[in-house]
Each structure stands twice: as structure tokens, then as C-alpha cells.
Image (tube, rainbow, N blue to C red):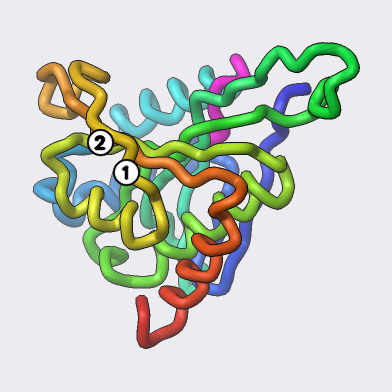
Amino acid sequence: MKIQAVVLQGRHVRLEPLERRHADGLAAASLEDPSLYQWSPVPRGQEEALQYIDTALEWQEQDRAVPFAIVRLADGVVIGSTRFFDLERWAWPVGNKMHGRTFPDVCEIGYTWLARSSIRTPANTESKLLMLTQAFEVWRMLRVCLHTDVRNQRSRSAIERIGGKFEGILRAHRMAADFITRDSARYSIIAAEWPGAKQKLMELMDPRGV
């Protein structure tokens, strides 16, 4: 069964199903400081934002992704985007307890970016907490992967900070944001590790840990 769009709301941000109405907000968020996005494919301007959204919605229609706009609760401003993607459903045989699962077995979280004004605020931490809770506690996923450009040390540190386990380097994995062949640092959290990762995220959400 195809995953339906869902709103995920925390204390600081709300993850809304991405729609074309978010284009202006995404364009404005990315213009705060374009230098931030050396390693990330981020839309610049309204036209690119619309194309970005249309591609994400096409993936959603194909049951390949669940994209979100990240909205700051304090003022309702769009501050970035993120998504679940590479949704995989495994062919569990008849008679296996996992046969007939409604939701995918594993996925990736990525395409995450924030406006300059939201860096080093609770926005990213809470977004990951909301998404991982949805993945492990609602969809009962077995693993969530996170990849980043091997050169992007800030992103790698952030993934490790929330409990992602480093698995290795995938060589020539994807096209990089600067249009070269990208090596990716691969991380994951599996279901058995989620309680510990969740505790770490909750501690980071404390004002002293954000």
C-alpha cells in the first residue's frame, strides 16, 4: 500500500507534505545564504523551487519518496525541506511473520536543508526526531539510512551526533551538487538501536543540548 502524506508536528517545527504552495518559502529560505549549500542540491529562486517540488511529488506518486516542507511554528515561515526516499519493500514469503506488511521495510532520510537563520536551532534535531519516530514507531521500519557527501564534514558530524552508525564509503555513489561523481559516507540506524538514538535526540532537544 502506498504511503500517504502525513503532517509531523513538534514543539519547534511542523513537517508539512510538500506542495507547490511552498515554492516561495523554499526560494526565500535558500537565498538567506547560498554558500551553505556547497554539498546539497538546493533550489535557487522560484522556478527552481517549483521544479524541485514537482520532482519530489513525482517520486511520491511513484511511491519512492515522502517529501516535506519544514515550517517554523513560531511564525509559520518555511525554513527548508527534507524527505523519506528509497523506500524498499522486501519480498517476505507467505507464512513469514513479516509477510503482508503495510509499510516499507527500510528507507533513507535525506534531501535535508535549512535556511541560514535555522542553523544551530532545534529545527534539524526535531525534524530528525519526528521522522525517525514515524519510521520506527509508526511504520515499524527495520533500518533508516542516511548518506552525505564524503567531503561534507558538518553533515557527517550532525548524523553521528544523532546516533547514526558509520558503515563506510560508497565510491562513485551519486552525482554531487557540484556535478562531479560523489563518494558518499553511509550511516544507518536500525530498529534495535532506535531506543538509544531516540534518547540521544531527546537529550539534544533539551535547551542545554541543542
Write the residue at 52% across / 36% down: 84
Q: Is residue 41 visible?
A: no
Magenta stretch encompasses residue 134: no
Asked whether disc 1 touches disc 2, contact meaning CB atoms under 8 Å apart, the reply is yes
Measured in 3D between alpha carbons, the distance from the residue under mark 1 to the one under mark 2, in whole angstroms, is: 7 Å
The residue lying furthest to the right in this view is 95
Write the residue at 36% across / 87% down: 208
Magenta stretch encompasses residue 66: yes
Residue 146 in picture, x, y percent from top left: 39, 39
- At label 2, counting other C-alpha atoms closer than 10 Å, the crowd grade (few under 14, some 14-19, many 20 or more) is many
Write the residue at 48% across / 57% down: 127
Position of 28 relative to 54 (above/below) = below
- Answer with the quarter of the image where residue 62 lies: top right
Three-letter amino acid code of the residue under disc 2: Ala
Magenta stretch, residue numbers: 62-67
- Answer with the quarter of the image where residue 152 lies: top left
Position of 177 relative to 91 (above/below) = below
Tell me the tag on residue 34: none
The residue lying furthest to the bottom in this view is 208
Position of 151 relative to 118 (above/below) = above
Number of marks drawn: 2
Name the foreground residue: 106 vs 21: 106
Question: In the image, is 110 to the left or to the right of 48?
Answer: right
Q: What residue would you read off at disc 2?
A: 185
Question: In the image, is 156 to the left or to the right of 5?
Answer: left
Write the residue at 43% across / 41% down: 188
Q: Which of disc 2 and disc 1 is earlier in sequence?
A: 1
Question: Which quarter of the figure is the N terminus placed in?
Answer: top right
Tell me the tag on residue 166: 1
Q: Secondary structure at mark 1?
A: strand
Name the foreground residue: 208 vs 193: 193
Q: Secondary structure at mark 2?
A: strand
